[in-house]
Amino acid sequence: MQTITDKTKEALEDLIIINNDRYEGYQKAMEQTKDSDLKALFSTYSTQSKGYASALRTHFPAGEEQPARDETRISGKFYRAWMDVKNALTSDDRQAVLNSCEYGEDVAKKAYENVLEDRENLSDDVLNQVQDQYDELLDAHNTIKGLRDANQN
């Protein structure tokens, strides 16, 4: 039976929970925004996060305990960032929404960077998966940041 180290398990759990947070945040943002371009983008990133979490789960051996599919960090910074998204959407301020989303993407990006800094504790297949997701997450971050910066004009 395949086993994973405690550090690898912890890293995978952290990334799964971050992706659950990201999914929930974009779901909330998508439901509340009136801007069709943002709805489409938020839907894409929400789906992306769900896929990332599912892909990360495949690295756990059968029967190995892992975070619940909807587990989030309610008390964490990431959740508070998404609450800022909700508040910004309530005020119907596109700039505030994009600022909050960019902050949320910063938090997710940092979580991936933390895992990648400790790469010697990851197997090659886990490392490749995490690196690929990070690269795509960086694209998402840059897209949100670009929209935010363009909206400041």
Image (cartoon, grey):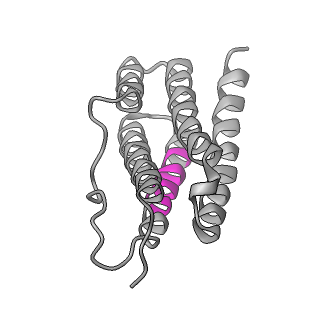
Depth order, front residue of 153/79:
79
Residue 116 point in image, percent of width and height: 63, 48
- Queried whether the magenta region covers residue 19, the answer comes back as no
Number of numbered markers: 0
Q: Looking at the image, which residue is at 65% across and 25% down?
A: 148
Magenta-colored segment: predominant secondary structure = helix
Residue 131 point in image, percent of width and height: 66, 56
Magenta range: 41-52
Please give left or right for residue 35 compared with residue 14 in the image: right
Residue 50 point in image, percent of width and height: 43, 59
Query: In which image quadrant can residue 122 be found?
Result: bottom right
Please give left or right for residue 119 compared with residue 52 in the image: right
- The residue sitting at the bottom extreme is 1
Q: Is residue 152 above or below residue 125?
A: above
Which quarter of the rendering shows the C terminus?
top right
Which quarter of the rendering shows the N terminus?
bottom left
- The residue sitting at the top extreme is 153
Residue 29 point in image, percent of width and height: 41, 37
Q: Looking at the image, which residue is at 50% across and 24% down?
A: 100
Please give left or right for residue 27 compared with residue 115 in the image: left
Depth order, front residue of 152/101:
101
- Queried whether the magenta region covers residue 49, the answer comes back as yes
Q: Is residue 120 above or below residue 75?
A: below
Depth order, front residue of 59/149:
59
Q: Is residue 82 above or below residue 137?
A: above
Q: Looking at the image, which residue is at 65% across and 68% down?
A: 124
Depth order, front residue of 101/36:
101
Query: In which image quadrant can residue 27 be found?
Result: top left
